[in-house]
Image (spheres, helix red, strand yellow):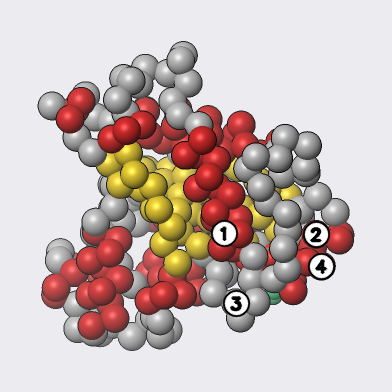
Amino acid sequence: MAESKTFKIGIIIGSTRVVRVGPQVAKFILDTVQTGGPSESSSADTTLKSRTTVDIIDIKDFNLPIFDEPGIPNRIKSPEAYQHEHTRVWGRHIASYDAFVFLSAQRNWGIPAELKNAIDYLFHEWKGKPAMIITFGGHGGLQCAEQLRTVIGAIGMRVVERMVNMKFPSFEYLDKGFKGEDLGLDVRNDEGPWAEHREAIAEVFWDEMVSKMLVVV
Ligand SMILES: Cc1cc2nc3c(=O)[nH]c(=O)nc-3n(C[C@H](O)[C@H](O)[C@H](O)COP(=O)(O)O)c2cc1C
């Protein structure tokens, strides 16, 4: 029965830079979705939130080299069938999730190479699963969002139409972002420059992705 099924959703940090702000942004998103829930106007049943767990996936933890599998991932049906242990570990981890939030910084109008690399390693572990896209950067990440939509669409993910664009509030924040400094992201702060993004993040996550795409009645 759909009502008893549990769901596991991962927020993927798309940058592994030596200094970076991705983990702060991911924590803000995690706190935002955990504070929120399906809206009353959504068709979600009241137990949905308690049946959904959300955590952060840091691709840096997986130490993936530049793609080095000899096979083509779309022909490999199980994580155990990859040649390298690093791919099997990554594949098992991704296979254990039902849906993803892709959090991508913008780099030269594109997605970080390490995110593309981590995506390319696998295929069936992603295929058919819902995904939402959140981008950030000095100019907000519109171009990398479109690129990411194309890439994860190509591997058969079901991508939520509405994307969230967390443009840095000013050049001061862009500078902090480059240096990996504290951006002051606090989900409890109603006044700060990030507060305006909370509503969109929670709505897209709970109403567009979880209630509409993940729950199959
Ligand atoms: C090589 C490089 C290229 C960048 N290019 C862009 C860009 O095209 N547009 C933009 O809005 N921000 C750009 N930025 C700013 C990043 O989005 C910003 O530094 C962000 O903090 C990176 O995320 P991270 O700290 O998690 O790695 C770039 C940053 C780097 C390091």
Badge 3 crowding class, 10 Å Cα cut-off, few under 14, some 14 to 19, many 20 or more, is few
- Tell me the amino acid under the disc marked 4: Asp
Kindly identify which residue carries mark 3: 17
- Separation (CA) of disc 2 from disc 1: 17 Å
Report the quarter where the C terminus lies.
top left
Report the quarter where the N terminus lies.
top left
Establish whether ligand 1 lies closer than 8 Å to the Cβ of label 3: yes
Kindly identify which residue carries mark 2: 173
* Figure quadrant of residue 108: bottom right
Kindly identify which residue carries mark 4: 175
The foreground one among 158 and 134 is 134
Establish whether ligand 1 lies closer than 8 Å to the Cβ of label 4: no
- Tell me the amino acid under the disc marked 3: Arg
Which of the labelled discs sits on residue 104, or is there none? 1
* Figure quadrant of residue 69: bottom left
Residue at horizontal 81 percent and vertical 50 percent from the top: 169
Q: Quadrant of ligand 1?
A: bottom right
Tell me which numbered mark, 2 or 3, is placed earlier along the sequence: 3
**Are the residues at dot 3 and dot 1 in contact (C-beta closer than 8 Å)?**
no
Tell me if residue 197 comes above or below residue 113 in the rendering. Answer: above
